[in-house]
Amino acid sequence: MTRVTRREFLATSGTGLGLLATGCAPALKGDFAPKTGRRVVVIGGGWGGATAAKYVRLADPSVEVVLLEPGRRFVSCPFSNLVLSGVRTIDSLTFGYGGLRKHGVRVLHETATAIEPDARRVRVGEGYLQYDRLIVSPGVEFQTEQVEGLAEAGDQVLHAWKAGPQTVMLAERLRAMPEGGVFVLTVPPVAYRCPPGPYERVCQVAWYLKNAKPRAKLIVLDANQNVVSKTALFRAAWQAYPNLEYRASNKVVKVDPGVRQVTTEFGDTVKYDVVNLIPPQRAGTIAVQADLVSADKRWCEVNHVTYESVKHPNVHVIGDSTIGLPVPKSGNIANAMGKISALAVVRLLNGKEPQALAPGNTCYSWVNDKEAIAVVNAYKIDGGKVVQIEQKLTPGQSAQWGQHALGWAASIWNDMLG
Amino acid sequence: MRTTLAVLVVLAVASGAAAGPLDAPGADKAVVCSACHGPGGQSPSNVMPILAGMPSWYLKKAVQDYAAGRRPSPEMEPYAKQVLQLGVDEIAAYFSGQTRQPAAVRPDAAAVERGRAAAAQCVVCHAASGKGDPGKGIPDITGQPQGYLQSQMLLFKADRRSPGDESLKALKAFFRQIADEQIVDLAAYYSSLR
Ligand SMILES: Cc1cc2nc3c(=O)[nH]c(=O)nc-3n(C[C@H](O)[C@H](O)[C@H](O)COP(=O)(O)OP(=O)(O)OC[C@H]3O[C@@H](n4cnc5c(N)ncnc54)[C@H](O)[C@@H]3O)c2cc1C
């Protein structure tokens, strides 16, 4: 897998279905790409969807795969906290979809607007695509309405929780912050994308401030009662950052960019120079609209072996949008679910019993520019359900785990997109 | 000839399926491994060992050592338990059946030459080819990423790989006499061997 080149970027707007996806093409109408054989449509070309699309092709090249993803580039959330500290560039985390095309995946840069499970169709604007089975991996959406003032604030208040332009903007604001400034970072209540992610971000911002703006301060307002993941390891790492103030059970319910202030549910106010507000989350919008979510209207329940939705047949949901499995919302898990769901879908299409396969998880977190910590989870299928076999943590932080993190990233990016 | 072809085509249409790389036995059970060891066990990094083409006896031994906590690794201990759960024989057979490609990071040519000379000390166990001897429990160390080979030799030296294992005591004493710089060269050399 290579990073996107200009040539590849141009090529993506050229051939086959891709032509229909370009901005200047006529609007999509009717059955704009009639099915010729058995077809799997994948919604979302992130960690889960890109993997699933590739693995369906690897498992059975006679199955046609169409991937719907509005973004022309894949930007990795894992390692994006290092962009804030300036340890990595966003370009080093940005990849093209050329690798998937080489596997015969038809990548369409479009947004799915609705799912019609009875007709087995995905709507794309005025047109539609037919499928035999559908894999949905739309990631998370922010519950902006849960924080007063957030919707109106627009880009004045950044989440940077989907790697991309916001990540770069937040890094710029951090650089431009006054010497003795205050950076406020808020952590949403569980369940949210990447349990250790906010705390890794705390490390990266604190590391940057310690070196570049030693008089500045980082205040963390956590809606949860304690650090949600790798608690002891993060708390040990934070010993190196006297500029960090961590406040548990401080759920932020209001933001006012006019006076640069957030308010907690107990009415306490905290002033900031730069804020990073990570909002509460739910499944991607398409999953909510398509009635794939449970009664709480937040997350999707699935069969633990096939990832088929418990609500609609032939529709499989993977990645951050799912709930009910004892797994974190991580890229590693989304990748594993992508592979397992792809194998299950192919077996179902071929009239075979799906294999009972469990995912695995490893989350490396960078605690400074070189050292990392990790949590590892192994699982099995027991009575049709995913059950954890074991969880292990690294004994402390070290550059060795940092090296392993780099090895993991090289492999998993290749596994998804190469 | 023509009839055979026609029959094949009819069969293919009847079942509707086509064979992909994941049809190899055991491939499905190994899907979680590629997150670190790369697709088909062909690790693209300098850090993670390549599993493609690894003799099954050695993969099985490594998995058993990790699962029992004899060879400490926070990553591999849980995954090794998962492998035992799924059936280590099938997974080992799958990886041993994959063709090993050269490691992605090519070692420095001068280091390879220095390593070639220094490797005289290793042939008694790992053989001139570097392919080892299954009968004596000595692994094939050819074609692994340089960084991985280096890290393992340093772990032996510090008694951090399989600490306290009596059968490896002599090996660790032996590594303690080798300078770290020479370990880099030895890793370069064995990484370059096919
Ligand atoms: C700062 C940060 C650090 C992280 N670090 C790690 C880490 O170190 N390790 C780790 O394992 N995980 C990490 N994660 C978590 C990881 O990024 C997510 O768990 C992972 O991206 C989930 O994959 P997904 O496929 O569910 O969603 P995504 O990867 O977000 O993919 C969803 C895709 O669907 C597309 N989409 C949405 N709606 C539609 C639609 N209607 N039509 C078409 N396409 C649509 C979106 O454009 C998007 O590309 C981190 C996350 C963050 C924010």
Image (tube, grey):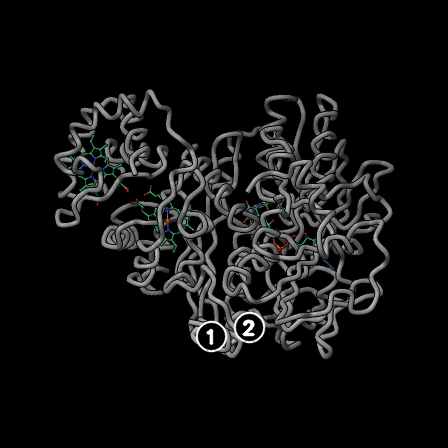
Q: For the point 38% across and 55% down, which residue is it?
A: B79
Q: Are marks 2 and 1 in contact (CB under 8 Å)?
A: yes
Residue placed under numbered mark 2 in the picture: A303
Q: Nearer the viewer, residue A239 or A114?
A: A114
Q: Which of the 4 quarters of the picture holds residue B174?
A: top left
One can see residue A120 in this view: yes
Give the residue type that dot 1 points to.
Gly
Q: Secondary structure at mark 2?
A: loop
Q: Is residue A401 above or below residue B5?
A: above
Residue placed under numbered mark 1 in the picture: A384
Q: Is mark 2 within 8 Å of ligand 1?
A: no
Spatial CA distance of label 2 from label 1 is 8 Å
| Letter of the chain that mark 2 sits on in the rendering | A
Q: For the point 47% across and 43% down, which residue is it?
A: A408
Q: Nearer the viewer, residue B148 or B42?
A: B42
Whole-percent x and y of residue A202?
Answer: 60, 37
